[in-house]
Image (spheres, coloured by chain):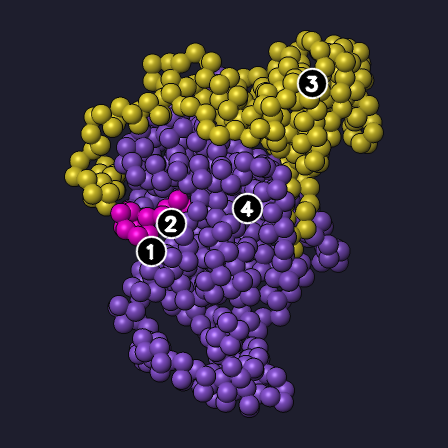
């Protein structure tokens, strides 16, 4: 397929009126754009103090049918989660991400809650994860795949519960990239992307049948966010 | 694949206009997307400025496309993925088949991909004895009906729920024939259940890409259902089908484009799932595909570069142009006869298929200009349709009656006195004839016009005459 590659690249060049690669000076500028990106125009709606940013996140998430509940601190998470399961008539069984934050949550407060850590299976009704970061602009959660967070937890079970400490709420998607760029680079790659970055804005939906909005097409029917107001 | 071909556009339109189900489906969907877009635009004061920026990003990338493609390829390889280059749809089919056969795949899951449609990937897989399953609800519905999508983001928008029910009953014969299935929700639940099983069976998952990022070698898809994610996470191999113009320089540029994409498409602030995939799963990961392949398709696009049609390569496939097009909203997507309908299809299809095959799609326009007005990347669609019309005319592909008519008209139009004399005579006669009923239900030699609507009778004076009387 080497030839196909050269054919296509050569056709691009020919059509753009060049005979060879872009000249060295220009290439330097373009490399700069690739490796040292600058932010483009950002919506001003996130120019808010921290408290209001949290409110904006909550409002935007609720607008797209996520449910949001606030708890004071990490100690209140188990009760809040159990209450939610009861309210929604869901079993007290969850599959949970092997996540350091969730590991420090005092689950022993809810001894009846059955927790399995790791990958979801077909029978699992409820998954619990945290989110690496969240974006107030559109009420979006950002999940990074990794040993602490298998991506299938975000999609397979019908109910997805996300524990989110408020200090992880940022303004926009660009803040997410900056956090990823802090992962130490390797020789090959300046930016160490996780295999999958999932931006999640509300529960799964489809409008494919007569444009009727229905929740729970393939991913979760319910997305519940527990906002933790302090460490 | 049943359906129509672009060169039979006129025949397709006649059939589509007579289709009662289509009329019903189009009436129901009317205003849904346009209202949503307007609301999203109103909620974001920066929307228009972002559209300008989005256009500039795409223009910049396309002007330097070879550079960004090579940079992107390098990053995919260094993150452990593979890049395959395909000049034609046939090449892309072969690459997909080779990958599937290399892992002994018998079942393939597909997330929604317009490049997949463009390359008839499902047909190629089926011919090789591999079971291909569309997992997007709309795509699944049209797959079991053996149809093409009629819209680039709402593939089954042409169908009523009764038609979907009928198809589900015909296909899901293992389920109780007496089950109730008359609501969209019950239809969705049945599809969810049937497709859930398929996710675990497939060895290969195929998705499209909304953007490719040169900075990181990532592919980005946006979906609302989550099917694209399950399709790429559960199988052993993930194949990304993308055309070459999907690449953008960096993640910031992708973010700007994402801000205008969902708003222009469905009117959402952001799609439910925006997924950035980079290479195969890492050693320590608990899930994800072991192999990651990207197929970069040309299929005629390099031929549009450097021509007046280069602007079309900015398209981010939001579908706003067709949602706002009075022609599309009347005839539906299937009339266009190929993968891409509406104004963007009328410009793109002749570029990819050739003027001989699709050259008269650009005639299906009232030139009202709404498509250009709502395009998130400012593609001058009406201007590009005019260019195609000129090419069609130059190549003598237009019917002789049309050509003679145009010649006669231009002879008269170039002679203002003759033009005014003839038109005022015509208005007087039509005004007199139509005096009683105020409209004509048929006119000799213009049956095509009066077949679907009446012609209002003129009042007897031309506009120019009335204007000169006023001043």
State the SS at label 1.
helix
What label does residue B47 carry, if any? none
B467 vs A91: above or below: below
The answer to whether residue B31 is visible is: yes
Q: Is residue B447 magenta?
A: no
- Name the front one of labels 4 and 3: 3
- Residues tagged 2 and 1 counted as in contact (Cβ below 8 A): yes
Residue at 70%, 52% (x, y): give it.
B184
Q: Is residue A13 left or right of residue A192?
A: left
Report which residue position mark 3 lands on: A51
Mark 4 sits on what residue?
B265
Q: Disc 1 sits on a residue from what chain?
A: B
User: Please, what is the dominant secondary structure of the magenta stretch?
Assistant: helix
Instruction: Report the residue marked by disc 1.
Output: B351
Residue at the spot 60% in from the left edge and 65% down from the top edge? B22
Q: Secondary structure at mark 2?
A: helix
Q: Position of residue B394 (x, y in %)?
A: 26, 68
- In the picture of the structure, the residue carrying the numbered disc 2 is B312
């Amino acid at each position: 397929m080497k030839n196909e590659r050269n054919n296509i690249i050569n056709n691009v060049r020919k059509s753009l009126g060049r005979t060879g690669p872009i000249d060295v000076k220009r290439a330097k500028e373009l490399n700069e754009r690739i490796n040292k990106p600058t932010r483009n125009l950002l919506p001003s709606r996130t120019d808010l103090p921290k408290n209001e940013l949290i409110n904006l996140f909550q409002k935007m998430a609720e607008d797209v049918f996520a449910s949001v509940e606030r708890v004071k601190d990490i100690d209140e998470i188990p009760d809040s989660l159990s209450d939610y399961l009861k309210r929604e008539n869901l079993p007290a069984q969850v599959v949970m991400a092997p996540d350091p934050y969730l590991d420090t949550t005092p689950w022993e407060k809810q001894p009846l809650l059955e927790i399995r850590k790791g990958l979801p299976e077909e029978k699992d009704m409820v998954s619990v994860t945290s989110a690496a970061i969240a974006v107030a602009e559109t009420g979006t959660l950002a999940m990074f795949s990794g040993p602490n967070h298998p991506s299938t937890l975000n999609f397979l079970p019908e109910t997805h519960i996300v524990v989110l400490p408020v200090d992880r709420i940022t303004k926009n998607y660009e803040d997410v990239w900056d956090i990823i760029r802090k992962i130490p680079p390797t020789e090959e790659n300046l930016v160490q992307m996780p295999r999958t970055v999932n931006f999640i804005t509300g529960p799964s939906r489809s409008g494919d049948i007569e444009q009727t909005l229905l929740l729970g097409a393939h991913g979760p029917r319910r997305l519940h966010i527990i906002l933790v107001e302090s460490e | 694949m049943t359906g129509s071909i672009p060169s039979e556009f006129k025949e397709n339109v006649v059939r589509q206009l007579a289709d009662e189900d289509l009329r019903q489906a189009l009436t129901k969907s009317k205003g849904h997307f346009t209202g949503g877009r307007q609301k999203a635009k109103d909620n974001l004061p920066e929307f228009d400025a972002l559209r300008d920026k989005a256009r500039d990003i795409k223009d910049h990338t396309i002007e330097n496309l070879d550079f960004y493609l090579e940079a992107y390829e390098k990053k995919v390889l260094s993150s452990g993925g593979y890049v395959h280059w395909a000049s034609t749809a046939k090449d892309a089919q072969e690459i997909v088949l080779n990958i599937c056969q290399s892992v002994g795949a018998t079942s393939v899951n597909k997330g929604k991909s317009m490049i997949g449609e463009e390359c008839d990937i499902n047909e190629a897989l089926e011919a090789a004895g591999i079971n291909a399953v569309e997992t997007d609800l709309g795509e699944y519905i049209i797959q079991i009906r053996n149809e093409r999508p009629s819209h680039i983001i709402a593939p089954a928008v042409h169908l009523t729920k009764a038609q979907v029910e009928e198809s589900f009953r015909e296909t899901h014969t293992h389920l109780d024939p007496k089950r109730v299935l008359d609501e969209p929700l019950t239809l969705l639940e049945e599809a969810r259940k049937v497709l859930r099983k398929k996710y675990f069976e497939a060895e290969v998952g195929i998705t499209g890409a909304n953007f490719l990022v040169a900075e990181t070698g990532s592919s980005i898809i946006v979906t609302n259902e989550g099917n694209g994610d399950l399709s790429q996470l559960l199988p052993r191999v993930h194949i990304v089908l993308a055309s070459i113009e999907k690449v953008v320089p960096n993640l910031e540029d992708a973010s700007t484009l994402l801000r205008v994409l969902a708003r222009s498409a469905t009117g959402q602030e952001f799609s439910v799932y925006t997924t950035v995939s980079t290479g195969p799963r890492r050693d320590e990961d608990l899930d994800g595909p072991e192999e990651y392949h990207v197929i970069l398709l040309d299929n005629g696009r390099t031929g549009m570069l450097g021509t007046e049609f280069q602007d079309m390569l900015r398209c981010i496939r939001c579908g706003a142009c067709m949602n706002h097009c009075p022609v599309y909203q009347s005839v539906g997507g299937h009339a266009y006869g190929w993968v891409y309908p509406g104004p963007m299809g009328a410009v793109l299809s002749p570029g990819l298929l050739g003027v001989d095959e699709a050259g008269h799609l650009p005639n299906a326009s009232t030139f009202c200009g709404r498509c250009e007005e709502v395009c998130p990347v400012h593609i001058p669609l009406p201007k590009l349709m005019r260019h195609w019309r000129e090419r069609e005319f130059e190549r003598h592909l237009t019917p002789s009656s049309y050509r003679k008519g145009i010649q006669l008209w231009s002879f008269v139009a170039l002679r203002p006195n003759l033009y005014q004399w003839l038109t005022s005579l015509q208005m007087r006669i039509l005004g007199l004839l139509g005096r009683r009923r105020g409209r004509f239900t048929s006119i000799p030699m213009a049956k095509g016009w009066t077949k679907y609507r009446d012609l209002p009778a003129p009042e007897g004076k031309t506009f120019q005459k009335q204007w000169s009387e006023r001043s």
